[in-house]
Image (cartoon, helix red, strand yellow):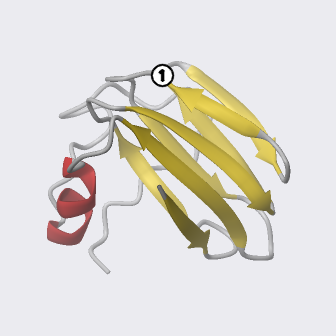
Amino acid sequence: MGFVTLDPDGGQVPWHNQEQEEIYFVVEGAGEMCLGAERRTLSSGQAVSIPPGVFHQLTNTGSTPMQMIYCYGPAGDVAHWRQELEGTLPRAGIDAPPLPEGAHPQCTEVF
């Protein structure tokens, strides 16, 4: 379980998947949630359940920071954190399924 703040205007948890089930809960702000082939707006007070193995991405589309809580079940190592830091995330539409039509592009920059 953890807490993340996504920067305004495009801060992102990029397109990825993992073996664990996951839940995102938006504490503050609004953004675009891509889950498999779906794309929806997610805002303060809403949650989304992410099944194991399904690619997903959350992008802050607002002009203020977006705060969210995530929870994995079962607990364990999640490869995408390491992949983000190393710049080795599977690329949407190349190494991984494409993002839903009209979605914000996947961030693949190393920070």
Up/down of 51 relative to 18, above or below: above
Question: How many dots with numbers?
Answer: 1
Identified by mark 1, the residue type is Gly
Residue 68 at what x, y percent from top left? Answer: 65, 59
Q: Residue at point 73% right, 53% down? A: 26
Up/down of 107 relative to 64, above or below: above
Residue pointed to by mark 1? 36
Residue 50 at what x, y percent from top left? Answer: 51, 28
Q: Is residue 12 left or right of residue 106?
A: right
Q: Is residue 19 left or right of residue 13?
A: left
At label 1, counting other C-alpha atoms closer than 10 Å, the crowd grade (few under 14, some 14-19, many 20 or more) is some
Q: Residue at point 72% right, 32% down? A: 40
Up/down of 97 relative to 80, above or below: above
| Viewer-side residue, 73 vs 110 | 73
Up/down of 56 relative to 5, above or below: above
Q: Is residue 23 left or right of residue 29?
A: left
Residue 16 at what x, y percent from top left? Answer: 34, 41
Residue 62 at what x, y percent from top left? Answer: 79, 65
Q: Considering the image in quadrants, where does the C terminus appear?
A: bottom left
Q: Is residue 46 left or right of residue 38?
A: right
Q: What is the quadrant of residue 17 in the picture? A: top left
Instruction: Point out the residue furthest to the bottom here.
Output: 111
Q: Residue at point 69% right, 67% down? A: 67
Element type where label 1 sits in the image:
loop
